[in-house]
Image (spheres, rainbow, N blue to C red):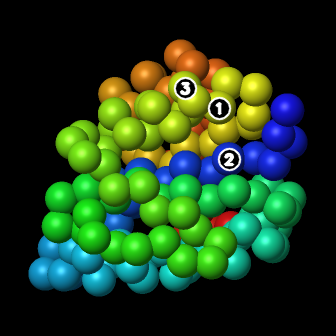
Amino acid sequence: MNDTPLLIVDGANVVGSRPNGWWRDRAGAAARLRDSLAPVATTGLPARLPAPVEVVLVVEGAARDVPGTDGVRVVSAPGSGDDSVVDLVAGAPQRRRLVVTADRELRERVTALGAEVYGPRWLRES
């Protein structure tokens, strides 16, 4: 059993939660999110999620070609990003799984599989 928590970030949803011009450069916005997540793997989220953490960023559409980096595995969704998030949650049933999204339907799908769900603000305020 892997004791390292799995933090899965719904990239499109988290990027889209802030009206900062992300729509002009979706891939760039996803890369900036990826880079902001990199320290989480080794430092965790203070007072919320102790390190180490496996961080996975799910990207789709125009951001599909954003590569992974040290500390962040990037999963390029072949179709729906939501389906890829659900697949990741379902594929790790014995681990603590945390999903960051504000999408109501996705929240229901992953909580039904035993994942914890947090909104984008939870990630930004950590």
Characterize the local packing of mark 1: few (<14), some (14-19) or many (20 or more) Cα atoms within 10 angstroms. Answer: some
Label 1–label 3 contact, CB within 8 A: yes
Kind of residue at badge 1: Ala
The residue tagged 2 is 6
Amino acid type, label 2: Leu
Image x and y of residue 87, in percent: 45, 32
Q: Which residue is mark 1?
A: 92
Quarter of image, res 81: top left
Q: CA distance from mark 2 to mark 1?
A: 8 Å
CA distance separating discs 1 and 3: 6 Å
Asked if the residues shown at circle 2 and circle 1 are in contact, with their CB atoms under 8 angstroms apart, the answer is yes
Looking at the rendered image, the disc whose residue lies closer to the viewer, 2 or 1, is 1
Q: Secondary structure at mark 2?
A: strand
Judge left or right: residue 34 versus residue 54. Answer: left
Say whether residue 57 is left or right of residue 70. Answer: left
In the image, is residue 16 above or below residue 35? above
Residue in the picture at 75% in, 34% down:
95
